[in-house]
Amino acid sequence: MTSARQAPARARMGPWRFVVWFGTVSLLADFVYEGARSVTGPLLASLGASSLVVGVVTGAGEAAALGLRLVSGPLADRTRRFWGLAVAGYALTVVSVPLLGVVGTLWAACTLVIAERVGKAVRSPAKDTLLSHATAVTGRGRGFAVHEAMDQVGALVGPLTVAGVLALTGGDYGPALGVLALPGVAVLGLLVWLRARVPDPEAYERGITPPSTAPGAPDGRLPTAFWTYAAFTAATTAGFTTFGLLSYHLVERHLAHTAWVPLLYAAAMAVDAVAALATGWAYDRYGPRVLAVLPLLSAAVPVLGFTRTVTVAVAGSLVWGAAMGVQESTLRATVADLVPSGRRATAYGIFAGVVGAASLVGGALTGALYGSSIPALITVVAVVQALALILLAVTRPGRARARR
C-alpha cells in the first residue's frame, strides 16, 4: 500500500502546502467577488431596485451558485476534469465583477450579479473535491477551516478596498469595482501554476484511504446519511437572511452611509474566519454535533439586524458573518466525510442544489416579509430554525470516519 508520506511526493507538494496555496487562490477570488457583494444591495437600490427585488436577486444569485452544481458536480465526476472546471468558474467570476461597475441599467446589473454566482457554481464541486483529497491527510475540519479562514482574508480586504475607492470617488461604483480586476488576473495565473504542480490531488487520499474502506452504498448510490444531512442544511438555509437585505436595511433606514457598508461586511468576514476555525477544530474533535450552533446563529440575525439601533443592527451583521463561517467550512467538511471520493463532486453538486433551492426560498421570503412586517419576518425565521434543530436531532449525521 502507498504510504501517506509517498502520496504528497507524487503530488510534488505536501497536503498542507496545497491547502494553503489553494487558500491563496480563494483569498484572491474573495477579494474580487466579496468586494462586489459588499455593495450589491446599495448598488441595486441606486439603480431603482425595491427591497423585494434585492431579496429576489440576491436569493436567486445564491440559488444559482448552489443549484447549478447539480450539473457541474456530476459533470466533474464524469469527466474528471476538476482543474478545468475550477479554472472556468473562476474566470467567469473575475470577468463579471468589473463589468458590474460600469453597467447603468438594473436588468444588466441583476444579470451580472447572478452571472458571478454562476461562476461559483461551475467551480465549486470541482474545487471542493480537489481540496477534500488534501484534507484527508490534514483533517477534514482543520483543512476546510484554514481554507475558509484564508477566504475571509480576501473577503476582508476586498470590501475595505471598495469602501476606500467609494470614499475617494464620492460613491462611484465604476472605479470601486474596476480595481478588482487586478486580483482577478492573479487568481487565474496562480491556478495555472498550482495545476502544474499538483495535477492529481487524489494522490493524497489514495495514500491513506484504500478505496474499499470508503463509505457509501455498494451500487454507487450516495449514502442515506448524506441525504438526511442535506435535508437539515436545506432547512436551516431556508431561514437565512442575505447580507444584501441587511445592507439594504442599513442604507434605506439611514442607519449607515453606503461607504460604511463594505466596512461592516469586512468585519463580518473577519468574524466568519474566526467562526470557521473554531467550528472546524471542534468538528475534528466532536463531529457534526457542532452544527447545532448554525440554526441558533441564523435565528439571531434578523432579530438583531433589522432593528433601528445602529449598534444592534451592526451586531446582527456580525452574527450573520459567524453563521456564514459555519456554512462555508464545517458543512463542506461533513460532506467529504460522508461520501467516497469517486462520487464526491456529485455529492457536493446535489448538496448545493438542495441548499440552493432553500436559498431562493429564503431570499424571497425574507425580502417579502421585510417589506410588510419585520416582526413577522423574525417569527417565521425563528420557527424555521427551530424545525432545523429538530431535524438535526432526528437525523443525527454520523461523526467523521477518522480523527486526524
Image (spheres, helix red, strand yellow):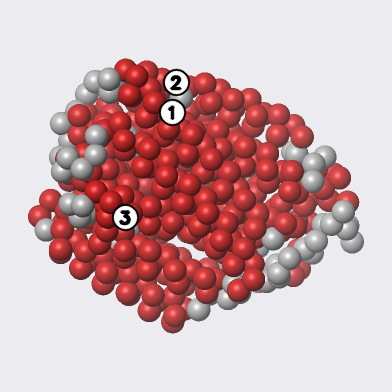
User: Between tags 1 and 2, which lies in front?
Assistant: 1
Q: Using the image as rendered, state which of residue 30 and residue 313 is in the foreground.
A: 313
**Residue depicted at x 55% and y 33%:** 28
Asked which secondary structure carries label 3, the reply is helix
The residue under the point 44% across, 56% down is 322
Q: Tell me residue 189's x, y (percent).
A: 63, 25
- Amino acid of disc 2: Val
| Amino acid at circle 3 | Gly
Q: Looking at the image, is mark 2 or mark 3 earlier in the sequence?
A: 2
Residue 44 % position (x, y): 24, 33
Residue 301's x, y, as percent?
A: 31, 59
- Residue positioned 46% across, 25% down in the render: 180
> Which residue is denoted by mark 2 in the rendering?
179
Residue 378 is left or right of residue 151, and the answer is left
CA separation, marks 2 and 3? 29 Å
Amino acid found under the numbered disc labelled 1? Thr
Side of 309 where 186 appears, left or right? right
User: What's the residue at 79%, 64% (across, down)?
Assistant: 210
Give the vertical position of 143 relative to 281 (above or below). above
Tags 1 and 2 touching, CB below 8 Å:
yes
Residue located beneath label 1 in the image: 161
Q: How crowded is mark 2: few (under 14 residues within 10 Å), some or many (20 or more)?
A: some
